[in-house]
Image (spheres, coloured by chain):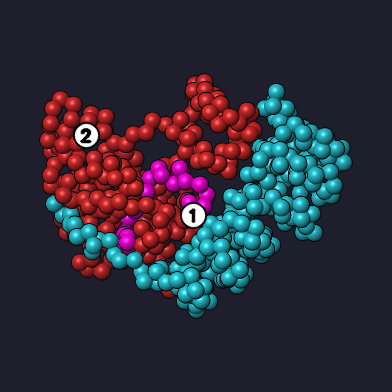
């Protein structure tokens, strides 16, 4: 997050609200609470600063990176006929996994040569239900062209559209908890994982557990895309940093550090 | 469309049988020659207090960074004094990555670390004392101020003092001012330190006023 001087009042007010809400009494006490993430205060503060929303083609520079670099690299190493597996976690109400499918259809000329599997998971079953229903309002569509909306959605009424049934059937929705080892053990062999804007809500230990779980979910050489304000380097040294013109992503090393 | 969907059961593979073994099998697996097996065992033992001695022993001998990370995470998840005792020796590691990982792990356990702070801040190795100042960052402001002020009163190494001053600038309270002033007077011949201290005193005073 980045705020210029004009947002100073906004920041001061939100901080004052959180200091009062937590009974911290002073900025120092509140800052110490924030640093130790007591009572998930980081999440509360981030929520105070952000409008929780998601939309189609959000952070599409990562989608561009996927088609410009990641898929080509993965396919060079992938055995023939092996499906490309992409995971969106957390997928919230479905905008991200559907965006991945739409982006591939629109921007990757080789899309018909390969079997592509898109799995979308979230801990919130209400969000998953909404994702599977695929009904969206104008705000979720704001980054899409009129032409794309016409081709991928059917209008329900003036305010809402429903995603194309074929696209809806392209994505498999499942429930998963990023920090539950047993839960995550059901998910393996992904080539690309989109895990955006969730690790910032976790405490240090949970972030490390999630990073280790994601490591196991990826194929060797597989990539993980985080939100623009997140860095895996600070969370875990398990992954290599890959800098592309469009985005910084993280990669599970092809060979493990014990040479296997 | 080119997209395929497998059935739910084939998409979601069954959990690895190794992950279902009991704690005893995971403890034994910490000594496996296979790093993948040790990694799985360390992850499975996360939060298991009874496994701390075995995890501590494994941490001391583990050569694969990835597995070491998993052992540290497992100890963090227990988060008791025994876990801290296991992590503290990593502050002396020759490997900078391991030292940093230990600092991060210990910073996340401010309550469990507190009983160790006096000894760590009095350690004979100045590098250990510098890293110990970092552990105060996540402590309550009054606790961080108390332990770091105590350090400043008798610390002879300017770099250790500088590290403590930097942490105090972030989390210190006004109670640190006398120790900071005394430190500045003691190190008047090391110009950067009185300068850093004056900045820190100004910051602490402005925040609290």
To the question of a shared chain for discs 1 and 2, the answer is yes
User: x, y (%) of residue B179?
Assistant: 82, 38
For the point 49% across and 54% down, the residue is A208
Q: Which residue is mark 2?
A: A136
Mark 2 — on which chain does it sit?
A
Against A49, residue B118 (above or below) is below
Image quadrant in which you'd find residue A219: bottom left
Across the whole image, how many numbered discs are drawn on residues?
A: 2
Mark 2: secondary structure: strand
Mark 1: secondary structure: helix
Q: Which chain is red?
A: A
> Position of B90 compared to A67: left or right?
right
> Position of A58 compared to B36: left or right?
left
Residue B202 appears in view: yes
User: x, y (%) of residue B200?
Assistant: 73, 34
Q: Which residues are magenta?
A: A186-206
Which class describes the residues within 10 Å of circle 1: few (<14), some (14-19), or many (20+)?
many
Mark 1 — on which chain does it sit?
A
């Amino acid at each position: 997050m980045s705020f210029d001087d004009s947002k100073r009042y906004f920041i001061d007010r939100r901080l004052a609200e959180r200091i009062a809400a937590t009974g911290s009494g002073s900025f120092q006490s509140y800052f110490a609470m924030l640093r130790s993430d007591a009572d998930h205060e980081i999440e509360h503060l981030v929520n105070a600063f952000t409008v929780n929303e998601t939309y189609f083609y959000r952070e599409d520079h990562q989608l561009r990176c996927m088609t410009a670099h990641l898929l080509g690299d993965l396919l060079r190493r992938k055995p023939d006929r092996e499906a490309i597996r992409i995971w969106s976690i957390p997928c919230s109400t479905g905008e991200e996994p559907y965006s991945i499918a739409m982006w591939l259809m629109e921007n990757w000329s080789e899309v018909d040569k390969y079997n592509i599997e898109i799995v979308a998971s979230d801990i919130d079953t209400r969000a998953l239900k909404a994702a599977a229903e695929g009904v969206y309002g104008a705000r979720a569509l704001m980054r899409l062209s009129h032409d794309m909306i016409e081709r991928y959605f059917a209008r329900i009424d003036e305010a809402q559209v429903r995603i194309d049934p074929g696209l809806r059937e392209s994505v498999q929705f499942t429930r998963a908890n990023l920090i539950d080892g047993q839960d995550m053990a059901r998910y393996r062999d992904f080539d690309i994982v989109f895990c955006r804007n969730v690790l910032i809500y976790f405490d240090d230990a949970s972030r490390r557990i999630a990073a280790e779980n994601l490591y196991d979910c990826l194929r060797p050489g597989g990539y993980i895309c985080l939100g623009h304000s997140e860095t895996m380097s600070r969370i875990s040294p398990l992954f290599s940093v890959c800098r592309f013109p469009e985005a910084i992503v993280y990669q599970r090393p092809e060979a493990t550090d014990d040479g296997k | 469309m080119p997209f395929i969907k497998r059935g739910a059961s084939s998409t979601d593979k069954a959990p690895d049988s190794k992950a279902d073994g009991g704690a005893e099998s995971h403890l034994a697996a910490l000594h496996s020659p296979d790093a993948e097996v040790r990694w799985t065992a360390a992850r499975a033992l996360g939060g298991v207090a009874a496994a701390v001695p075995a995890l501590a022993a494994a941490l001391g001998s583990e050569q694969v960074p990835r597995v070491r990370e998993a052992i540290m995470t497992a100890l963090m998840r227990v988060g008791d004094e025994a876990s801290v005792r296991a992590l503290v020796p990593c502050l002396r590691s020759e490997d900078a990555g391991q030292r940093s990982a230990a600092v991060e792990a210990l910073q996340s356990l401010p309550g469990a670390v507190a009983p160790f702070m006096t000894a760590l801040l009095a350690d004979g190795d100045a590098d250990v004392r510098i890293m110990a100042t970092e552990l105060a960052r996540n402590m309550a402001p009054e606790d961080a101020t108390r332990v770091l002020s105590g350090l400043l009163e008798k610390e002879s190494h300017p770099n250790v003092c500088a590290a403590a001053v930097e942490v105090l600038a972030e989390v210190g309270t006004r109670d640190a001012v006398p120790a900071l002033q005394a430190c500045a007077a003691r190190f008047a011949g090391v110009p950067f330190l009185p300068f850093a201290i004056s900045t820190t005193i100004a910051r602490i005073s402005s925040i609290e006023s």
